[in-house]
């Protein structure tokens, strides 16, 4: 099933109604995240309040940090079991939200698409909009019966350091950086992005860049990938490469 652009984001009213429809299998994920600290987000956010019926999805699970890429892609086998334990199967419509700034919800949205689950949407405004709409929250955890689930990676939605290096020469894909504007030189102010061409989203850790993929999809561009290592990896590897080049000079 391919999600249409209009379903990339769903509103609180739609979610409230969908959760009460027996014919519509929805699983709402609270993805409030504490970087590189598995389980902490569950206690810090989820157990204090969450949308009734939602389950906690920890982005730290099944990911093995490295020096170059502290937020690596999850192991498919491990993630398959983790997702299945949340009561999600291939027919489930997954809705992601967080209690922070939507970055982790965006990463989870992209992650499900990367691992072959296109039936996934973002909750517009997160839990803040849910509460302001007058809907209840709870501190009571929710559990569901386990399902069988198998992650099927789609490499076309991701880019690595080597791919970014090649793209510098080929210039086949536009690279769009989602970090705050204070990190950029003035040249970015005059840059334009062509939504008819392929895009690569990047940021500091590969989290905010997922927002580029979501925004592009809403605007009709589904040919967008995310550089998962982003600036954290690039800055280290580029320095190493430059040092090696200098050492090799006569």
Image (cartoon, rainbow, N blue to C red):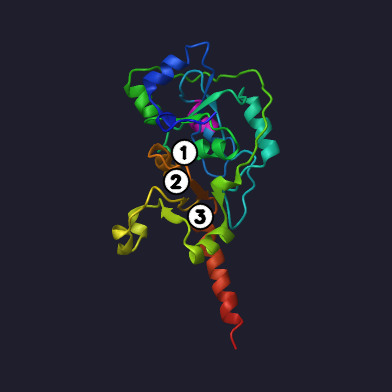
Q: Which residue is the site of mark 1? A: 106
182 vs 17: above or below:
below
Q: CA distance from mark 3 to mark 2?
A: 10 Å
Q: Which residue is the site of mark 3? A: 230
**Residue 128 falls left or right of residue 37:** left
> Magenta residues?
42-47
Is residue 209 covered in magenta? no
**Residue 81 falls left or right of residue 13:** right
The mark found on residue 208 in the picture is 2
**Observer-nearest of 65 and 37:** 65
Q: Residues within 10 Å of mark 2 (few under 14, many from 20)?
A: many
Residue 74: percent from left, percent from top: 63, 42
**Residue 204 falls left or right of residue 244:** left
Q: CA distance from mark 2 to mark 1?
A: 7 Å
Q: CA distance from mark 3 to mark 1?
A: 16 Å
Mark nearer the N terminus (2 vs 1): 1
């Amino acid at each position: 099933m391919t999600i249409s652009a209009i379903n990339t984001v769903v509103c609180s009213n739609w979610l409230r109604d969908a959760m009460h429809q027996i014919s519509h299998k929805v699983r709402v994920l609270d993805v409030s995240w504490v970087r590189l600290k598995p389980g902490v987000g569950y206690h810090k956010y989820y157990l204090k309040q969450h949308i009734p019926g939602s389950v906690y999805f920890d982005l730290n699970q099944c990911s093995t940090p490295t020096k170059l890429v502290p937020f690596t892609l999850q192991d498919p086998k491990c993630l398959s079991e983790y997702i299945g334990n949340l009561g999600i199967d291939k027919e489930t419509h997954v809705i992601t939200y967080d209690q922070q700034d939507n970055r982790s919800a965006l990463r989870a949205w992209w992650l499900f698409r990367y691992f072959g689950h296109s039936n996934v949407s973002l909750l517009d405004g997160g839990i803040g909009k849910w509460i302001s709409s007058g809907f209840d929250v709870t501190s009571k955890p929710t559990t569901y019966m386990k399902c069988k689930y198998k992650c099927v990676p789609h490499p076309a939605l991701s880019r690595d350091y080597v791919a970014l290096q090649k793209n510098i020469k080929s210039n086949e894909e536009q690279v769009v950086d989602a970090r705050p504007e204070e990190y950029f030189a003035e040249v970015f102010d005059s840059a334009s992005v062509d939504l008819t061409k392929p895009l690569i989203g990047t940021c500091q850790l590969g989290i905010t860049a997922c927002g580029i993929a979501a925004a592009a999809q809403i605007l009709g561009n589904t040919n967008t990938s995310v550089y998962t290592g982003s600036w954290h990896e690039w800055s280290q590897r580029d320095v190493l490469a430059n040092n090696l080049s200098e050492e090799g000079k006569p």
